[in-house]
Image (cartoon, rainbow, N blue to C red):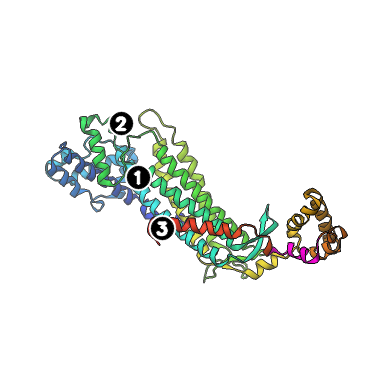
């Protein structure tokens, strides 16, 4: 049963991936693959392996009853093995869970879930990238004000802002893909990580088990070495932080006093129960909430690296709740950012109006750099500061105040002053940076065969 409150900050697909049924299905996949691997090495009869594999169906298991028993047993693997054994016909019953321990089944199932979860996140992140790439191309030359410390600073283009989002999201795709390739691994170690019950064939069984489940085979069992889990959790924490940065930008752009971009209107979306005029940024707001929830879970998983000897007391068990929550909340943040970007309504006219709100003062650095070759940078900066102060007092624009100042017009013509105060002429390497972000994204697409 999916918690309807949590679903506000997750996705149905991720909730299904980390449901109790999915975890049981993963443990059954482990048991079936283990039996087949052991039959291939001659440890158990092939008929027994076939009987075990034929019985490893989640539809045959009472999942609700299993987890009720798990509360008493301390692990869901113990009642699962009992239920599975009852389902197996003939002598195959004797070979269920042969040489394994509960953590082998639980960890491997969790790895299968995380593999599917990472695939879902990567797919949604690619959707974020696609939306950002479209915005970067479409608004490449759309001027807007760049802001530092929430104050107007220098001109940029909205295409550059979208390209920065794109670059950020693209790196998360690469990071999660790397974690998928390097941090996932099958788990099989037996009681204390020696595989003593399998004799000399233990390592071979691990290799075949990994082959059966299409998971990497580790060099050693990793029951209490949780760096693999921590690496994935850390990558998700960084990814969700990246999504929160984009969502925060969208929220700020949608402020009434800024009003440069907003989420697409839809019936029943973004209204207020008290104020009919409101159009709230629902997707970005939900993304920020999901991100905070996700980031709150990451420390639980990192602290779970502190484990005792060959089996943990409490830390490993905490992962059972923390990892599904982390994947769920991360998926909610990514998906909501994707939705916000896909329907983002951009207002170039409002961007232009805000850019000229200070009557040219945001171009003070450009004027300084135009004067610097003649006066030296320190003197040019002092001079422009005086001109800016005069502009504020007289309520005229910076261009007129500069031209009226003899120290300025003695070295710069009116045409040179106006050129230095044109935002279009002070965008630096904006086009190059946009192209780089788009090229990096296309490389990701090409590596996946999407182009």
Disc 2 designates what residue? 193
Above or below for 267 versus 116:
below
Q: Residue at x 25, y 53 (%)?
A: 59
- Packing grade of label 1 (10 A; few <14, some 14-19, many >=20) is many
Frontmost of labels 2 and 3 is 3
Q: Position of residue 401 (x, y in %)?
A: 83, 63
Q: Position of residue 428 (x, y in %)?
A: 64, 57
Q: Which label number is shown at residue 111?
A: 1
- Packing grade of label 2 (10 A; few <14, some 14-19, many >=20) is some
Q: Which label number is shown at residue 56?
A: none
Which of the two residues, 334 or 359, is positioned nearer the viewer here? 359
Above or below for 219 versus 362:
above
Q: Residue at x 77, y 53 (%)?
A: 373
Q: Position of residue 351 (x, y in %)?
A: 65, 66
Disc 3 designates what residue? 446
Magenta span covers which residues? 412-423
Label 1 or label 2, whichever comes before in sequence order = 1
Residue 257 visible in the snapshot: no
Which of the two residues, 310 or 341, is positioned nearer the viewer here? 341
**Separation of disc 1 and disc 2 at Cα?**
18 Å
Label 3 SS: helix
């Amino acid at each position: 049963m999916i918690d309807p409150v949590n679903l506000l900050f997750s996705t149905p697909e991720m909730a299904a991936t980390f449901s109790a049924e999915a975890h049981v299905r993963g443990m059954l996949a482990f048991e079936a693959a283990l039996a087949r691997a052991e039959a291939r090495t001659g440890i158990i009869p092939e008929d027994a392996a076939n009987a075990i594999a034929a019985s490893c169906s989640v539809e045959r298991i009472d999942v609700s009853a299993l987890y009720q028993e798990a509360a008493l047993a301390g692990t869901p693997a113990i009642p699962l093995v009992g239920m599975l054994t009852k389902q197996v016909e003939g002598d195959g019953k004797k070979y269920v869970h042969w040489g394994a321990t509960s953590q082998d089944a639980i960890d491997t199932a969790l790895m299968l879930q995380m593999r599917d979860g990472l695939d879902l996140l990567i797919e949604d992140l690619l959707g974020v990238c696609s939306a950002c790439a479209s915005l970067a191309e479409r608004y490449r030359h759309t001027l807007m004000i760049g802001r530092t410390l929430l104050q107007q600073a220098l001109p940029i283009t909205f295409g550059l802002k979208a390209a920065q989002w794109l670059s950020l999201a693209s790196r998360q795709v690469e990071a999660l893909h790397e974690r998928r390739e390097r941090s996932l691994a099958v788990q099989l170690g037996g009681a204390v990580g020696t595989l003593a019950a399998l004799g000399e064939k233990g390592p071979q069984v691990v290799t075949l088990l990994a082959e059966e489940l299409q998971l990497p085979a580790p060099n050693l069992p990793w029951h209490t070495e949780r760096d693999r889990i921590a690496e994935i959790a850390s990558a998700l924490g960084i990814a969700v932080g990246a999504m929160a940065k984009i969502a925060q930008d969208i929220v700020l752009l949608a402020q009434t006093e800024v009003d440069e971009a907003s989420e697409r209107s839809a019936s029943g979306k973004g209204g207020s129960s008290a104020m009919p005029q409101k159009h709230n940024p629902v997707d970005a707001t939900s993304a920020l909430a999901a991100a905070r929830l996700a980031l709150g879970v990451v420390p639980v998983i990192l602290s779970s690296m502190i484990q005792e000897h060959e089996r943990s007391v409490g830390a490993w068990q905490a992962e059972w709740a923390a990892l599904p929550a982390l994947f769920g909340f991360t998926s909610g943040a990514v998906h909501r950012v994707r939705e916000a970007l896909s329907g983002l309504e951009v207002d170039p006219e409002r961007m232009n109006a805000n850019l000229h709100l200070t009557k040219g003062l945001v171009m003070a650095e450009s004027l300084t750099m135009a004067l610097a070759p003649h006066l030296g940078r320190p003197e040019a900066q002092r001079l422009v500061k005086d001109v800016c102060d005069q502009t504020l007092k007289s309520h005229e624009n910076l261009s007129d105040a500069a031209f009226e100042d003899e120290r300025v017009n003695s070295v710069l013509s009116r045409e040179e002053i106006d050129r230095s105060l044109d935002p279009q002429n002070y965008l630096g390497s904006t086009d190059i940076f946009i192209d780089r972000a788009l090229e990096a994204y296309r490389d990701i697409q090409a590596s996946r065969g999407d182009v």
